[in-house]
Image (cartoon, rainbow, N blue to C red):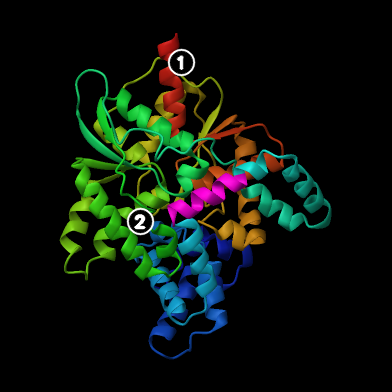
Amino acid sequence: MHCGLCLPVCPTYELTGLEKNSPRGRIRLMKNIMNDSLPVTNAFMEEMYFCLDCQACQTACPAGVRYGELVEAARTLVEKKKFLRLKNFIVRNFVERRSVLRVLAVVIRFYQDSLFERGVLTFLRVFSPMLYGRAKLMPRVSNKFVFRAIPETREPEGDIRGTVAVLTGCVMDVFYADVNRDTIDVLLINSWRVMVPRGQVCCGSLGGHNGDAEYSKRLAKKNIEAFEKSGAEYYVVNSAGCCAFMKRYAEVLSDDPNYSERAQKFSKKVREFSEFVYLTGFKKTQCKVTEPVVYHEPCHLVHTQRISEEPRSIVVEIAGDNFRELNEATWCCGSAGIYNVLRFRDASEILDRKIDNIKKSGARLVITGNPGCLAQIGSGIQKENLGIEVLHPATVLNRLYKKEGAG
């Protein structure tokens, strides 16, 4: 495709104005690599990872080019050339391994609760503003992780509509365990039996998006085995990025004779939280959000899964007359997994545009359904001391249920 409709929606093309930094330019580059017209070089690796993989270009493409799969295949090629061993070693062993991540999280929590953090941040603020900005990206570690803290099965009061299994995630359960609790509470209030399969592991999206395809397959197989045992009718995921990848297990394992059919059945059961709540219907509440609200659309929800109406309808319902449209709501916030850490300057420029739009909206609350967006937008708001809350839709909905119950 040469039409260029992808250019105006590409954040990196917007930053540089260079063709090579656009989806069209990158596809041409990938084509030359695949045809052996060009070798795999550090410059090629740099270009593949300059892309946020936000997939806004997929939404804009009239020919339906699945750019996200192309760039992930290119990153897998780079990985095979051993350019990124250290990066993927860290993701495998410190992020996607739940037990190790929890130990690290406890250490980080101790650091965050101590005076030592204040001293470190003061030092960095003076001597290294960039490191200071990176340090401020890290959300507060949750006081108590959900995965082992709640029973494997919880029953709702009254009639039961069916059984759902919930992914608690790796990063989600460390930094946003409260969102996991809110998700489970909302499902229970809406009469679903909730299971948290004990054998579940990280969804594998970070590895999958960064070229570590084989390791992601191993994680996908473990999750399929764990969730199958639950016997649940649906698998509910409250992280847009994780959900998008779990819906792709059927493709990821399509060439595996032992798992391809199981992966197809698995993917058909996966539902993003707002998608599930909207499609199955949820209890309306008379309590509404009392301050101006905007909705930021996570890339892996609106572009990858093409889910927009469902969460937007929920937000409109719970915000009532306080809902306001956010200009460029589908424009990436700059999080993109760990992009904001690895490419801090670029991510910060993209974030500034998002924060500027939020300020112009007059909102006092931003609702969004992805942990990366929660952290990235939250850091931008904190940096400018705007005093605006950034919350997951499950949290807002659960707060209103509790408020109504208390009233």
Q: Residue furthest bottom?
A: 37
| Dot 2 crowding, Cα within 10 Å, few <14, some 14–19, many 20+ | many
Q: Of the residues shown, which amino acid type is indicated by label 1?
A: Lys
Q: Residue furthest right?
A: 126
Q: Secondary structure at mark 1?
A: helix
On the question of residue 12 being in view, the answer is yes
Q: On the image, numbered disc 1 is attached to which residue?
A: 403
Q: What stretch of residues is rendered in magenta?
A: 97-108
Relative to 288, does residue 308 appear above or below in the rendering?
below
Rendered residue at 50%/56% (across/down): 337
The x and y percentages for residue 235 are 27, 43
Q: Tags 2 and 1 in contact by the CB under 8 Å rule?
A: no
**Placement of the C terminus among the 4 image quadrants:** top left
Residue 245, label in figure: 2
Rendered residue at 27%/40% (across/down): 165
Relative to 292, does residue 137 appear above or below in the rendering?
below
- Relative side of 216 to 321, left or right: left
- Relative side of 235 to 145, left or right: left
Residue 333, label in figure: none
